[in-house]
């Protein structure tokens, strides 16, 4: 299997939500694994924004169209409805203004696909409630003093924000620790307890 | 200063220079931005590699202020290596085994293209200051004539650094349908006040040289080599960085153990700059320096489009790759970033990379492995999208 056909399970689920031949903006595209997959397997016209210069250089070096930029600052540049999909994978919780970023994503693209670690997960709750310590889990693998995650939320928090912004949930998946979908409804209280992360496809209402 | 300077008389006549010449006659004058129709007009250019049958593999290289068409071969005047041999050649990022590379001496230049050094057919004497003031746009129109002459409908890529980047942006803005990939390196969409100021210092140095003779030195058989050398020395500082100068020279003394308590070149950095000035006047014309710096000063792509840079690129189908260098203070990253903002505003296909380097503006001419790797990747990706077979 080539690099482009095998990607992280959660990225695969994101990719599965994207229709063939779409225009995609991947915000926080890292080394470009998802963009390359979408380009090769979904004939997508892809663009990326990445904060780290090393990530940008790697992406451009593999032929992807990526700019160095910041989700908090640079999304305002893009015209309305310029893309079919704007993807924000595991980055929302690290932005300074998640509400603004989410609002911009759903302005720029017909669909926003957002994934994030679920702070409602039982291990998080257990860590704080029983041990009185900030959680360090596989999905949140940082000590409190080093974490880039400054705006963590639970699935229910996210749903509330989506409602506030007036964006509709088109599709949602609750994922287990291995990035595999759980059978429970993503909007259920059970999912908010057992899912380590969630993926949502949103559409401006 | 006891140094003696070289002389332009060492430059061979145009006819002896290698490469090609396109002569535009009175039936096809170059319509300049200043309103003048220039004819006859010569565009000297050089090519490397083979144009494929479909004529789809052409790469136009746009040279910088003091560059010329000799990109990837020994220079006919100086004997030095081509100015971008690191980038252009077999198995190089711009692979001449794969691409047909074109580089034209800019209009106003002094390596065979029409410029103030060339004979004005109306008077039979060198133009001097009667040569019309040209713009980056005029340079691009001259290049377009060469591209048409070669039967090329669309260039696979247009690439250049510094003033070359300005030409790339002008190409992409004026003729987007003729450019598949646009690669402006260490450039800007407008010349900044600081950069205009540096250019003015250079021009004043030339014009203050008594041998400049109001620009008529070629007719009066003088040569303002001192003024041009000083202009080059001042400009050369702006191409480097403080840390690069320090790393190269520090406060080291030149050929001596102690300070001379005089105005000889005590320091290595002085000696180096003097050398830069002296060697420059052997290959460059002082009036050309005035004209080309002026063209850069006039460049302001947003102003051409109602003050909004995004308008310069609306609806563009070009694939852009912008590259800047961290220590470049002449064309800093912020200039490239503002172009990226404008391109994002029209949802253009754009890549933007800032390369870490302490070599200043000149980094685009030097061995910067990450720069070359990124560029190779971008070109390979673009070739795939353009359907160019290996």
Image (cartoon, rainbow, N blue to C red):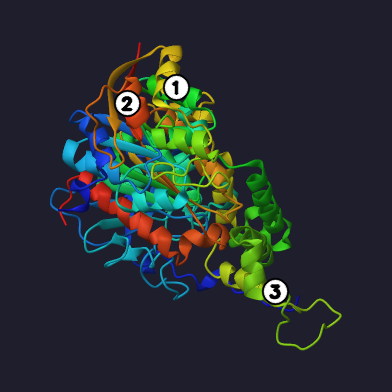
Return the residue nearer the eye: B119 or A198. Answer: A198
Is B76 rendered above or below residue B198? below
Image label count? 3
Q: Are marks 3 and 2 on the same chain?
A: no
Kindly tell me whether residue B179 is visible in this rendering.
yes
Q: Are marks 1 and 2 in contact (CB under 8 Å)?
A: no
Tell me the SS state at disc 3: loop
Disc 1: which residue: A157
Task: Tell me residue B217's x, y (percent).
Answer: 63, 60
Disc 2: which residue: A191
The chain containing the residue under callout 3 comes to B
Tell me the SS state at disc 1: helix
B139 on left or right of B256: left
Q: Residue at x 67, y 51 (%)?
A: B198
Is A183 rendered above or below residue A162? below
Is B20 rendered above or below residue A56? below
Identify the image quadrant of residue B370.
bottom left
Task: Tell me residue A117's x, y (percent).
Answer: 40, 35
Dot 1 or dot 2, earlier in sequence: 1
Return the residue nearer the eye: B298 or B306. Answer: B306
Disc 3: which residue: B250
Task: Tell me residue A163's x, y (percent).
Answer: 41, 13
Kindly tell me whether residue B151 is visible in this rendering.
no
Answer few, some or many: residues within 10 Å of disc 3's Cα (few below 14, many 20 plus, some between 14 and 19): some
Residue depth check, mark 3 versus mark 2: number of the one nearer the observer: 2
Task: Tell me residue B355's x, y (percent).
Answer: 48, 55
* Image quadrant where one finds the C terminus of chain B: bottom left
Return the residue nearer the eye: B91 or B217. Answer: B91
* Image quadrant where one finds the N terminus of chain B: bottom right
The chain containing the residue under callout 1 comes to A
Q: Are marks 1 and 2 on the same chain?
A: yes
């Amino acid at each position: 299997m080539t690099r482009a056909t095998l990607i992280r399970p959660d990225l695969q689920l994101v990719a599965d939500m994207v229709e063939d031949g779409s225009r995609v903006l991947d915000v926080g595209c890292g080394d470009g694994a998802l963009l390359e997959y979408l380009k090769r397997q979904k004939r997508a016209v892809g663009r990326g924004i990445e904060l780290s210069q090393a990530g940008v250089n790697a992406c451009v070096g593999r032929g992807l169209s990526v700019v160095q930029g910041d989700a908090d600052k640079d999304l305002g540049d893009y015209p309305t409805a310029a893309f079919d999909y704007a993807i924000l994978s595991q980055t929302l919780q690290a932005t300074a203004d998640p509400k603004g970023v989410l609002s911009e994503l759903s302005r720029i693209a017909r669909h926003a696909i957002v994934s994030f670690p679920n702070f409602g997960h039982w291990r998080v709750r257990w860590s704080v409630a029983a041990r009185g310590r900030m959680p360090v889990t596989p999905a949140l693998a940082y000590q409190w003093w080093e974490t880039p995650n400054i705006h963590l939320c639970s699935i229910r928090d996210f749903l509330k924000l989506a409602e506030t912004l007036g964006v509709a949930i088109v599709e949602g998946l609750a994922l287990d620790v291995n990035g595999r979908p759980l059978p429970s409804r993503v909007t259920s209280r059970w999912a908010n307890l057992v899912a380590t992360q969630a993926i949502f496809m949103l559409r401006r209402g | 200063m006891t140094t003696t300077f070289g002389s332009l008389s060492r430059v061979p006549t145009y006819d002896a220079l290698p490469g090609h010449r396109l002569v535009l006659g009175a039936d096809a004058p170059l319509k300049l931005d200043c309103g003048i129709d220039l004819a006859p007009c010569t565009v000297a250019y050089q090519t490397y590699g083979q144009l494929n049958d479909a004529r789809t593999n052409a790469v136009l290289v746009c040279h910088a202020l003091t560059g010329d068409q000799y990109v990837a071969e020994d220079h006919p005047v100086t004997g030095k290596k081509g100015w971008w041999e690191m980038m252009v050649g077999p198995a190089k990022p711009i692979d001449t085994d794969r691409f047909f590379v074109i580089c034209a001496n800019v209009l106003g230049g002094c390596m065979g293209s029409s410029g103030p050094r060339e004979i004005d057919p109306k008077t039979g004497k060198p133009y001097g200051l009667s040569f019309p003031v040209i713009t980056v746009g005029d340079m691009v129109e001259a290049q377009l004539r060469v591209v048409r002459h070669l039967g090329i409908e669309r260039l696979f890529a247009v690439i250049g650094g510094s003033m070359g980047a300005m030409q790339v942006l002008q190409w992409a803005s004026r003729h987007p349908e003729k450019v598949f990939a646009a690669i402006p390196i260490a450039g800007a969409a407008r010349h900044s006040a600081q950069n205009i100021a540096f250019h003015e210092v250079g021009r004043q140095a030339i014009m203050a040289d008594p041998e400049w003779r109001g620009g008529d030195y070629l007719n009066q058989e003088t040569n303002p080599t001192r003024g041009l050398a000083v202009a080059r020395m001042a400009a050369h500082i702006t191409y480097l960085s403080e840390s690069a100068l320090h790393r190269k020279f520090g406060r080291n003394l030149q050929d001596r153990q102690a300070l001379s308590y005089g105005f000889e070149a005590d320091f290595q950095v002085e000696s180096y700059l003097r050398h830069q000035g002296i060697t420059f006047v052997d290959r460059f014309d002082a009036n050309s320096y005035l004209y080309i710096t002026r063209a850069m000063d006039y460049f302001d792509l947003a102003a051409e489009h109602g003050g909004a840079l995004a308008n310069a690129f609306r609806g563009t189908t070009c694939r852009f790759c912008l590259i800047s260098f961290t220590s470049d203070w002449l064309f800093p990253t912020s200039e490239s970033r503002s172009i990226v903002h404008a391109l994002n505003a029209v949802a253009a296909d754009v890549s933007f990379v800032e390369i870490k380097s302490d070599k200043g503006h000149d980094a685009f001419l030097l061995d910067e492995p990450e720069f070359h790797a990124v560029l190779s990747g971008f070109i390979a990706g673009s070739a795939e999208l353009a359907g160019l077979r290996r």
